[in-house]
Amino acid sequence: RDGAVRIVEETGKPIAQVARDLGVNEGTLGNWVNRARAERGGEDEASGDSAAELKRLRAEVAELRMERDVLKRSVVLWVKEATK
């Protein structure tokens, strides 16, 4: 249960998708997630900081992936030119 809830919370994937991946009923996983969130109700400030950091990190990852893809394409073009 705890592991399934962590997957939902840490990856940001929809409950339905995680439930399908794990072979768990979507409603059951939803209940587990809601219960875990209710138990941590007093951690609003910390979760807000975590959410902000998560958003920043996701944006950074997206930018780095884009840069990596551009570099990959550049290398492919360079190799094609070099082998002519």
Image (spheres, helix red, strand yellow):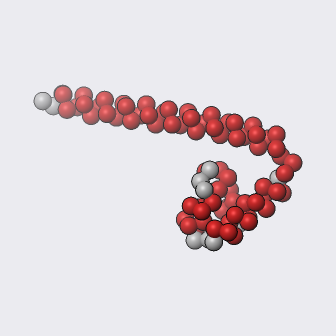
Left/right placement of residue 43 relative to residue 17 reads right
Q: Quadrant of the N terminus?
A: bottom right
Q: Quadrant of residue 46?
A: top right
Q: Is residue 2 visible?
A: no
Seen at 78% across and 55% down, the residue is 37
Q: Position of residue 64 (x, y in %)?
A: 49, 33
Q: Position of residue 13 (x, y in %)?
A: 59, 54
Give whichever of 72, 30 is nearer the camera. Answer: 30
Q: Is residue 54 visible?
A: yes
Location of residue 5 with respect to 58 vertically, above or below:
below
Q: Quadrant of the C terminus?
A: top left
Seen at 31% across and 33% down, the residue is 73
Residue at the farthest right position: 42
Q: Position of residue 48 (x, y in %)?
A: 76, 40
Seen at 53% across and 37% down, the residue is 61
Give whichever of 68, 18 is nearer the camera. Answer: 18
The image shows a total of numbered marks equal to: 0
Seen at 19% across and 32% down, the residue is 80
Left/right placement of residue 42 relative to residue 66 reads right
Left/right placement of residue 62 relative to residue 69 reads right
Left/right placement of residue 50 relative to residue 40 reads left
Give whichever of 16, 7 is nearer the camera. Answer: 16
Q: Quadrant of residue 75?
A: top left
